[in-house]
Amino acid sequence: MIHPKSLRGFLARLKLERHSSSRSRFSASTRVSTSRYVNQRTGLTLIELLMVVVIMVMVVSVAIPLVNYNFGEKKLRESARALNAYFALAKSLSAERNRQVGVMFERTPDSLNQCITMYLVEVPQPYSGDLYDARCYVRHNPYLTGFATNQEVLFDANCAMLTTNRSLVAAGDTFLIRFNYRGAAYAVRRHQVNNGAPATDKFIMQGVASVPGSWLPYDLNTMTGQYDFSTRGWGVTGVDDDMNGFVDDTAEEGLPVNTSNVPPQDASDFPVGFPFQIYLSPKRTQAQPIELPVGVAVDLAWSGMGAGGAEFDAWSTGPGMLPLTGPVMVLFTPGGQVERVYPGNGSFFQPTSTVHFLVASSETIQPLRAGVLNATPNPKSSDLNLQSPSHLWISVGPVNSSVTTAEVFYDPGAYTLDVCRQFARSAQSKGGG
């Protein structure tokens, strides 16, 4: 028989166990439902995810062009600063070494109006012959037609590098020569002359020069290259020695006439030929070149002298002609002036106005290839580099060599080169930097 107290205790424990079990089941179900609720509220549907992706794409598509534009403009300005500093380095080295130093713009072979690499160049030491008594002579050669002048420069046997192998000066190159270590320096160019048998090279003066004491008599056998350097006198009375149409004129005297003697002393009393100094074209130095970043180049098609000059354009030789392939060079004197500018055709000139270089995008520069004849019209008409105000002019003044940087001025109503250089010319006139 079960005692009543034991029965009540048993029933109380049973009720307590049922109550605990019920609470456990309720708590578990509550956690499950809450977890499901939370998971449903923090997740993303496919439509919501697609909307986020679309918004991100739209933001990126708007931001990338702005970033690229600012990055491209930054590269242009950094390139302009680097080129400006390179010019300053060339001027500094010229003063330090007491010789001409400059900057060379190397043309890209597949795009001759594009330059992405610049080098420092300097003029070598003057050449005065292989032996101390080397001499040069200037003469009129009537067989030289179609050249700047018919004045020819000859060198004696003591100048083997100019007579035997001619390795000192390449064909088509121009150099400067000074006679008797004083006076002006004259430009001379090595030309291929084909109106003789056999064809030969000649050193031809690029401007008429009167060099007393250096003339040689007229030689009928001018194209053989054989000259009689044993002749120590000049001037035959009654003979037009220099073939200029005048007999016994002052130019034939070689040296000024001494009127104190009767009859006056003529050039037959004086030796002919002078010692000389030759100043060669600039050569690359071992200095580190500068290379412009990808997408940036110096556009030589629009670079040149003065308000509207484009002398560095490879197409400037004209339609149906071979384009320029030589580098463009700007040479400074130790005093800081621009002494010479080489446009790339083997010759040079002394600038009288500002030299302008266009730092621009390389993408629109129209290709001109070496060895391919120029087409018509000039392909730079499709070059859009003058239409961007972010492109920059680097300008070098001819007298004080001040280097300035200015933006391209673009006016659709007056789209000419001189207008596009308006800011550059203004910066030079103010001497700004």
Image (cartoon, rainbow, N blue to C red):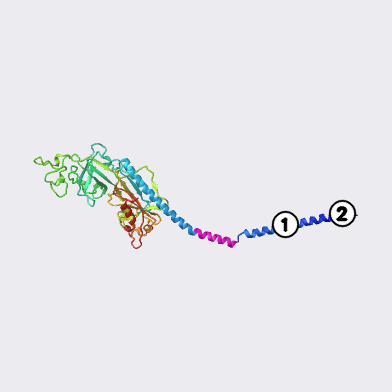
Farthest residue to the top: give it. 132
The answer to which image quadrant residue 211 occupies is top left
Label ID, residue 27: 1
Q: Is residue 240 left or right of residue 289?
A: left
Per the image, label 2 sits on a secondary structure element best described as helix
Identify residue type, mark 2.
Answer: Lys
Closer to the chain start, of discs 1 and 2, is 2
Judge whether residue 48 is colored magenta.
Answer: yes
Disc 1 and disc 2 in contact, CB within 8 angstroms: no
- Counting from the top left corner in percent of width and height, residue 249 is at 13, 47
How dense is the environment of label 2, judged by Cα within 10 Å: few (below 14), some, or many (20 and up)? few
Q: Is residue 260 left or right of residue 317?
A: left
Identify residue type, mark 1.
Answer: Ser
What's the distance in space between the residues labelled 1 and 2, CA to CA? 33 Å
- Counting from the top left corner in percent of width and height, residue 16 is at 79, 55
The answer to which image quadrant residue 285 occupies is top left
- Counting from the top left corner in percent of width and height, residue 204 is at 24, 47
Judge whether residue 359 is colored magenta.
Answer: no
Q: Residue at x 14, y 41 (%)?
A: 268
Residue 54, compared with residue 346, is above or below; it is below
Q: Which residues are magenta?
A: 45-60
Q: Nearer the viewer, residue 171 or 263?
A: 263
Per the image, label 1 sits on a secondary structure element best described as helix
Identify the main secondary structure in magenta: helix
Q: Nearer the viewer, residue 85 or 328?
A: 85
Q: Is residue 171 visible?
A: no
Q: Which residue is mark 2?
A: 5
Q: Quadrant of the N terminus?
A: bottom right
Q: Is residue 356 left or right of residue 145?
A: right
